[in-house]
Image (cartoon, rainbow, N blue to C red):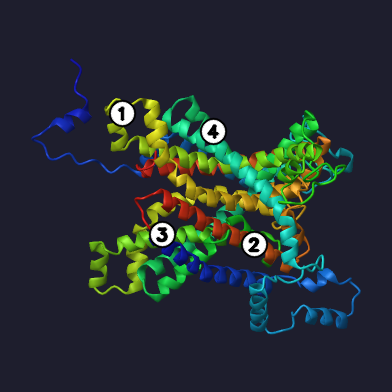
Amino acid sequence: MAPPEPEAERLSGESELPFVPRRPTLGQRVLRTMRKSPATAWGLTVVVALIAMALLAPVIAPFDPYGTDPRASLQPPSGQHWFGTGIFGEDILSRVIYGARRDLVIALGAVSIALVSGCLLGAVAGYWEGPLGEVIMRIVELLQAFPAFILAMAVAGALGPSFRNLIIAIAITNVPIYAHLMRVSILSNKQNDYAMAAIAIGGSSWRVLLRHLLPNSLGPIFIQSTLQPGYAILTAAGLSFIGLGVRIPEPEWGLMVAMGSPRIISGEWWISFFPGLFIIIAVMGFNLIGDGLQDIFDPQRR
Amino acid sequence: MNYLVYIVRRLFLLIPLLLGVTFVVFVLTRVVIAGNPIDQIVPPMASQEQRDRLAERYGLTDPIAVQYLKYMRNLVRGDMGVSFQTGLPVTREILKFFPATFELTTYAMLLALLIGVPLGVVAAVWRDTWIDQLSRFLSVSGVSMPVFWLSLLLIYFFFFQWQIAPAPIGRINPRLVAPDTITGWYTIDSLITGNWKALQSAISVLVLPTIALAYGAMAPLARMARSGMVEVLETDYIRTARAQGLRWRTVVFKYALKNALLPVVTMTAVVYGFLLGGSVLVENIFAWPGLGRFAYNAIASSDYTAIQGFVLYATTMFVVLFLITDLIYRALNPRIGP
């Protein structure tokens, strides 16, 4: 007879102390998550690879992303230029590699700004439910009345096209979602004993809010924040495509697709194709992580 | 009756919302705006005096509060100001470009509904089969693919490679005369007037931009239909219906479908907002003479009255559509009365 599994023994031992599960370490939890959801693992791999590509751009890019060479203009993909060359003879591959820097910074920057400001607004609105909270939520709802891309367009158009303004424009469209999530979370956590206790022992409002309520309300927001960078990249690329983002010759994926768009009807597909492909890869990477985490943490979702 | 009261109340609530929207747009396009719009319309050699005179004529020298009041007064009368670029009233420009966008986005919406909803339903009924995987793949790629990139790809294959689609040259072959305007929709106008050549051309140029827009719009609809259906199929009333020996097909298509599709109704407004945003990108690529292209040109020349007009129009449309779908949802769903 095979020796009983240690797990089974522990579970069946009635006379022993009640079974207390060991708290898994963070690494174990990540690993378990990955095994439960291969899609999340793929998403994480893609995003990590893109970040590595962005960081190592000077090492791996074969050419200068700003370099031009009139003699090598509009060459199809070849051994020398894997992704071909653009109208000025610029190497598309090198520009795609450097483009990861722009697009990831835009996406993560915009989402971080939206996360911090949205959470603060939502927390304040949830904690002080009176007129202050009302005003904040009315403003947030007002922002939601606009179709997201059109609001981003209006903001970026008003501020003028630049890298910084692009981040601001996308951040603004992302604020409402965090504000709503945070407010709901605070509203329910406020009723908990620990919050009452913190108030009862004389903690100041801000202290209770920032030290006790906020950290406990971050769960659902964290999951949402893994979904947003995907949309942020799409919005950024769209705005750059219509000239509201970064400017030529900056290597940014949306702008690179735009640079190739007049050439598509004459068959030079590679100028637009490869940057667009990387937009898809990046967006998919973030979305897979977000979806996977939602599936795992929200049993309601199937 | 109760429902009517609810509708009226919702319509009244629309007023402060739209006031807020106009305020945001005003702040964005007049207070925050970078660059002087006057620079866009005067030649670089214009004297300061000429610039000042123009600024005065467009009311740019007034205090900002006065500008806002004037702007609101005009807006109430349906006057959105004069476009710097064309010198024409923005309201008239929007009315001129509106039918093209309305036609394109409506066909895209219909296509997205026609494919997305059945796909989601089928994926839910045959969960975890190949059809579910296919539906998942289409959804994931639909939400990840930039609509402008898909448009370019479609042009490359269908126009350049296979030569089965016309060049991206707008709403109709430029060698044909546009059909007489009745509804403003080329497909319908040419059908009514029996202008078969125009009809054929109008349809053939519609195909690619419609597919490009619909692909992204399809994903959230399919997703919503699937999750709605999955949820309904696990409810007690469906189990009871099954237990009583009703045919599976009857249960799914007669009892489950109705409830499963309810959430899709509210989703359509959100998707339409997405289509309006996408139209800016797609119309630009397909030289489609609609509002999206109008907005693009306005941005390119910092024509703020025009940008303002477009944003106001699109947002109003979005908000009103949201209200309509919400009302339909409530009418269809007796569980949440007004």
Amino acid type assigned to the residue bearing label 1 in the image = Arg
Amino acid type assigned to the residue bearing label 3 in the image = Tyr
Q: Is residue A27 left or right of residue B17?
A: left
| Residue B3: assigned label | 3
- For marks 1 and 4, the one nearer the N-term is 4
Q: Residue at x 36, y 71 (%)?
A: A129
Badge 4 is on which residue?
A: B137
Badge 1 is on which residue?
A: B242
Tell me the subunit letter for badge 1. Answer: B
- For marks 2 and 4, the one nearer the N-term is 4
Badge 2 is on which residue?
A: B313
Q: Are marks 3 and 1 in contact (CB under 8 Å)?
A: no
Q: Residue at x 61, y 47 (%)?
A: A55
Tell me the subunit letter for badge 4. Answer: B
Q: Residue at x 36, y 41 (%)?
A: A29
In space, the residues marked 1 and 2 are separated at their CA atoms by 49 Å
Splitting the image into 4 quarters, where does residue B315 fall?
Answer: bottom right
Tell me the subunit letter for badge 3. Answer: B
The residue tagged with tag 3: helix, strand or loop? Answer: helix
Residue B74, horizontal then vertical, whole percent? 68, 76
Residue A269, horizontal then vertical, whole percent? 77, 36
- For marks 3 and 1, the one nearer the N-term is 3
